Amino acid sequence: MHHDQSVPRPQLSDDHAAATARRLIEDAYRPPAPAPTSYRDTTPLPHTGPTPPVPQPGRPPMTQHATDISGVLLAAGIASVPVGGSVSLVLWTAGQTDPLALAVICAAPVALLAALSRVVKRAKEAREAAPPVIHQHYEGTVHQDHSSYTTETRGLIARTANDNRR
């Protein structure tokens, strides 16, 4: 025999029900407590331990200058592969060529670069040797101002102090 008896529930007032609903919604949308992202172990470390030093993998320790030079050497070595391959291909295809003609072909780019560098050097010397020609035509009273302005900026937050000398 089944009796459909419901448990009597206490009746809530509208204000109390709204406050309960508001609290439940705020609890649902509240962000979780932040998890710790770091931990500092304050126990003192021993000065020496029983483990001997072990060579580390990778390049051996060296100065910064030696590291820079070794990087440049590695890059130059890798860059020489395509150049050497192309020279080998040219020499292989030109196997039946006259050695004098081959020497002229190989020396032509070097001679061209040397000639271009001489031309650029002479043009630069000529430009520096000749003073600029300035034509100035004045009418009426002319006043020339020979003021000199020295600016010095100092500090973490830049402060400019102008020294106006006349």
Image (spheres, rainbow, N blue to C red):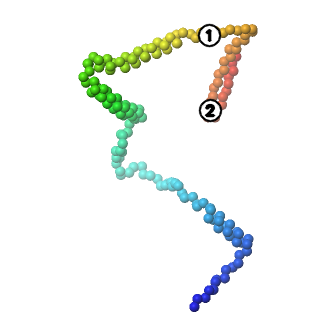
Q: What amino acid type is highlighted by mark number 1?
A: Ile
Query: Residue 125: x and y, percent?
Result: 49, 12
Determine whether 102 is above or below 76 in the image. above
Mark 2 → mark 1, Cα distance in angstroms: 41 Å
In percent of the image, x 66 and y 82: which residue is there? 8
Q: Quadrant of residue 134?
A: top right
Q: Can residue 73 be seen in this view?
A: no
Farthest residue, direction bottom? 1
Q: On the picture, is 16 further left or further right than 105?
A: right
Farthest residue, direction left? 96
In percent of the image, x 42 and y 51: which residue is there? 46
Pick the residue in front: 116 or 57.
116
Which residue lies under the disc numbered 2? 155
Which residue lies under the disc numbered 1? 134
Query: Residue 80: x and y, percent?
Result: 34, 30
Q: What amino acid type is highlighted by mark number 2?
A: Gly
Image quarter (top left, top right, bottom left or bottom right) of the N terminus = bottom right
Query: Residue 106: x and y, percent?
Result: 32, 20
For label 1, the SS is loop
Pick the residue in front: 21 or 64.
21
Determine whether 107 is above or below 61 in the image. above
Image quarter (top left, top right, bottom left or bottom right) of the C terminus = top right
In percent of the image, x 68 and y 70: which residue is there? 20
